[in-house]
Amino acid sequence: MEIAVAVTYHPDLDRYLLLKRSSSMSVFPQRWNFPSGPIEDQQPKNAACRELTKETGLDGTVKKRAAPFGLDESSYTFTIYPFLIHVQDATVTLNVEHDQYRWVKDRKIKTFDTVPALWTDLERLDLV
């Protein structure tokens, strides 16, 4: 499955947006992630922007993209397409996929129970 990831950054806050997947999600419930979702029938960049808006109500500007990378996790195989997206608004409206959010400094991200390869998104985008 191809997944677009919106690594969401608020430059004025100097923080990244993490979302906690709700317990009703079948894949990685209760784990923290960036807004993300399947690419479907569009360009990966457009899918990342779509997922950001769908999951948070935010709009942003794509600042950078990283080369896709593979992830094999238990019974799932993903191709991940990371994008750095800057937002100006910090007011998040969550959809049913998530039940919490946090604006987090990059050094604090590793203290969260995240989906696999979340830190790899940051590394691939040369953010850490």
Image: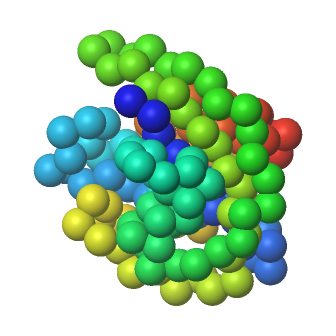
Relative vertical location of residue 2 with respect to residue 101 in this rendering, above or below:
above
Between 113 and 126, the one lying in front of the other is: 126
Residue drawn 38% across the image and 55% down it? 20
Q: Position of residue 25 (x, y in %)?
A: 20, 47
Relative vertical location of residue 126 with respect to residue 14 in this rendering, above or below:
above
The quadrant the N terminus occupies is top left
Query: Would residue 118 be found to the left or right of residue 55 on screen?
Result: right
Relative vertical location of residue 71 with respect to residue 113 in this rendering, above or below:
above
Q: Is residue 40 visible?
A: yes
Q: Position of residue 16 (x, y in %)?
A: 66, 61
Residue drawn 79% across the image and 53% down it? 64
Q: Position of residue 104 (x, y in %)?
A: 63, 61
How many marks do you count on the picture?
0
Query: Would residue 11 be found to the left or right of residue 50 on screen?
Result: right
Q: How is the image coloured?
A: rainbow
Quarter of the rendering containing residue 22: bottom left
Quarter of the rendering containing residue 10: bottom right
Quarter of the rendering containing residue 49: bottom right
Q: Position of residue 94 (x, y in %)?
A: 35, 73
Residue drawn 31% across the image and 61% down it? 98
Between 34 and 65, the one lying in front of the other is: 65
Residue drawn 63% across the image and 62% down it? 8
Q: Residue furthest left?
A: 24
Relative vertical location of residue 5 with respect to residue 48 in this rendering, above or below:
above
Query: Would residue 116 be found to the left or right of residue 108 on screen?
Result: left
Q: Is residue 106 visible?
A: no
